[in-house]
Amino acid sequence: MASSHGRCDQRFADWMSSLPRSMHTIPLTNLAIPGSHDSFSFYIDEASPVGPEQPETVQNFVSVFGTVAKKLMRKWLATQTMNFTTQLEAGIRFFDLRISTKPRDPDNELFFAHGLFSATVREGLEQISSFLSAHAREVVFLDFNHFYGVQNLHHEKLVAMLKEIFGEKLCPVVFAQEVSLQYLWEKEYQVLVFYHHPMALEVPFLWPGQMMPSPWANTTDPEKLVQFLQASVTDRRRKGTFFVSQVVLTPKASTVMKGVASGLRETITESCHKPEAMLLIFLLHRSVSPPSGLLWRNLFSHIHPLALSVFHQF
């Protein structure tokens, strides 16, 4: 598996175990936990086929322009510069995961994918498990929220893989308010798996997707994003579940066309002066009390100073 281009501060590798004792018994629904968007996208492979979820226009674009088209696609699809291990060392604890099969693959292998294919699911999960084995008091949230070309046999394969790789680390479904760090540490659980598919109702350790709602602003406008986040904070207080607050600016087709050769990072950061700064503004906004119960997903992976800013609110 590829190495990471990003660097991290090792102080964040054990931030959960370093929290004050007073926070050990607080439900995790009441803590702000940093996460990453399209967490697997560091591994996106330009040599892979186009994902089955892509529209015909994209398929045709790639068939005409080949490798050049895929290189441009990667510039807009790769939201992370760190691999799973480095994200974990940087403090990331929520992972946004999209699963796909490859067309005509005789092995029925499962891959992370968004537009183009990324690493195999097994590779990624084993990397996460290795980190957890070395950091026994850290906890991760794995959010399997999109499935492309995935049939029942693939779901069964993925469930078996989760059991094999994480074993006793998997936390079975209970009332969300019962789950605190103390609860997880006592039972030696480290992994909460959220599964946005009916299969979740059949497996004790698969938390149904509705227990991890993830509203999406779908905007390139920073001000609209902040307004959306404010409304989301108010709404999540009524749900009593975990909740994702997506600090994500989404480019429109016109945005892509204007900066097609520049890519996502350069184009979007020019318009909003870094998403990290925006989130900090949101946290300090007078009309919103310090948010809790949120799983923050950022556009890029460099969130370490921000992680401290979030946790110092409590």
Image: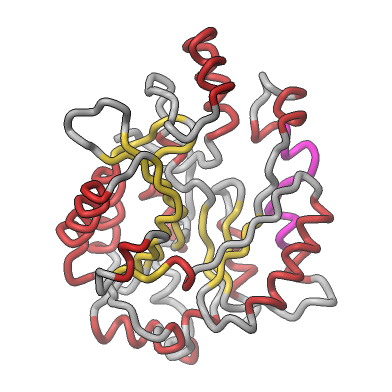
- Along the line of sight, which residue is nearer the eye, 159 or 128? 159
Instruction: State which quadrant residue 304 falls in.
Output: bottom right
In magenta segment, residue 278: yes
For this view, does 19 lie left or right of residue 130? right
Q: Position of residue 54 (x, y in %)?
A: 51, 31
Indicate whether 60 appears above or below 101. Answer: above
Q: Position of residue 220 (x, y in %)?
A: 76, 44
Indicate whether 299 appears above or below 29. Answer: above
Q: Position of residue 112 (x, y in %)?
A: 37, 41
In magenta segment, residue 193: no
Q: Position of residue 85 (x, y in %)?
A: 36, 50
Q: How many marks?
A: 0
Please identify the dominant SS of the magenta region: helix
Residue at coordinates 28% horizontally, 41% vertically from top-left? 110
Task: State which quarter of the image contains the N terminus.
Answer: top left
Instruction: State which quadrant residue 282 falls in.
Output: bottom right
For this view, does 43 lie left or right of residue 300? left
Residue at coordinates 18% horizontally, 71% vertically from top-left? 168
Indicate whether 23 appears above or below 55. Answer: below
Residue at coordinates 81% horizontally, 55% vertically from top-left? 224
Q: Which residues are magenta?
A: 267-280
Residue at coordinates 43% horizontally, 91% vertically from top-left? 25
Indicate whether 266 appears above or below 162. Answer: above
Query: Which residue sits furthest top?
Result: 64
Task: State which quarter of the image contains the C terminus.
Answer: bottom right
- Along the line of sight, which residue is nearer the eye, 236 or 287? 236
For this view, does 202 lie left or right of residue 192? left
